[in-house]
Amino acid sequence: MIRWREGIVEERLREWRGAVELAVTIDSQRVPALAYPDLTGEPVPGDRVLLNTNALDLGLGTGGYALVVAIPDRLPPDPVFQGHVVKGRYGPLQTVVLAVDEEASPTRPIMERASHLGGMPVVTADLHSALPAILAGIHADRPSAQVAYLMTDGGALPAGFSRNLDGLADHLVGTITTGQSWGGNLESITVHSGLLAAKHVLGADIAIVAQGPGNLGTGTIWGFSGIAVGEAVNAAGTLEGRPVGSLRLSDADPRPRHRGLSHHSFTAYH
């Protein structure tokens, strides 16, 4: 279900790699909105925009924006498809990307030969917000380490939603968006192929695997998108990597299930 609204762009507030934050007026009310120019084209003040207001109306903490679906009076030019892999499949905004291992990719020969990780450490985390801390810890110990980030599809699907990635870009050899997520330096269909690309295409010494921002949870033991890190641990082990599960620990979280060792970490790795 979608709540649809029309609005007028009043102001471009800030932008980062892959996204633009806007002030948009809907029925005389000024609201925050977010556009992904790769999908919609570049919005400018005065544009009429078609919006999905679900997240705004629900008051979501991480992603409480009205999302720009289209600039109907000024559609972007048709893109030239380089690949044929579709992400966000069979939704109205499905996007076409070039996967790192598909036939048209220049890295296809490398990926055809890649079969293992050769013991490469793979650090997993259940929250996107752990990425800066893990990266800082790695570089504190090994300043010259070449680190790749694999963004899984449990949270935000567009990599452009993450301001962390924009700020950390110079400290990573690249971002690989896996599964239905998209917008990284490389695109992969699975975590397995993403890990192989990190090692053999990007030349990473270490990979970090975590979902994008805006995780999904119901407060039940198994109803949390971050427990998919358990599957990433299995993928790393299958490919002869060295999985390292980072733990979610807190003495301040008011929720008992996250006090000390979070049940998310226990559930994912137990």
Image (tube, rainbow, N blue to C red):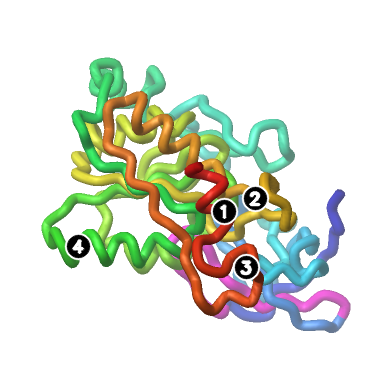
Direction from residue 56 to residue 205 in the image, left or right: left
- The three-letter amino acid code for the residue at tag 1 is His
The part of the chain drawn in magenta is 13-27
Across and down, in percent, residue 45 comes to: 64, 76
Q: Does the magenta stretch include residue 22?
A: yes
Q: Does the magenta stretch include residue 54?
A: no
Residue 224: mark in rendering: 2
Measured Cα–Cα span from mark 4 to mark 3: 27 Å
Residue 32 at least partly seen: yes
**Dots 2 and 1: beta carbons under 8 Å?**
yes
Count neighbours of disc 4 (C-alpha within 10 A) and say few if under 14, some if 14 to 19, many if 20 or more: some
Q: Mark 4 or mark 2, which is nearer the start of the sequence?
A: 4
Taking the spot 30% from the left edge, 48% from the top edge, the residue there is: 148
Considering the numbered disc 4 on the image, is that residue within a helix, a strand or a loop?
helix
Q: Mark 1 or mark 4, which is nearer the start of the sequence?
A: 4
Decide: is 29 above or below 233: below
Residue 139: mark in rendering: 4
Q: Mark 3 or mark 4, which is nearer the start of the sequence?
A: 3
- The three-letter amino acid code for the residue at tag 2 is Phe
- The three-letter amino acid code for the residue at tag 4 is His
Tag 3 residue:
62
Measured Cα–Cα span from mark 4 to mark 1: 26 Å
Count neighbours of disc 1 (C-alpha within 10 A) and say few if under 14, some if 14 to 19, many if 20 or more: many
Direction from residue 118 to residue 61 in the image, left or right: right
Count neighbours of disc 2 (C-alpha within 10 A) and say few if under 14, some if 14 to 19, many if 20 or more: some
Secondary structure mostly seen in the magenta stretch: strand
Taking the spot 34% from the left edge, 30% from the top edge, the residue there is: 237
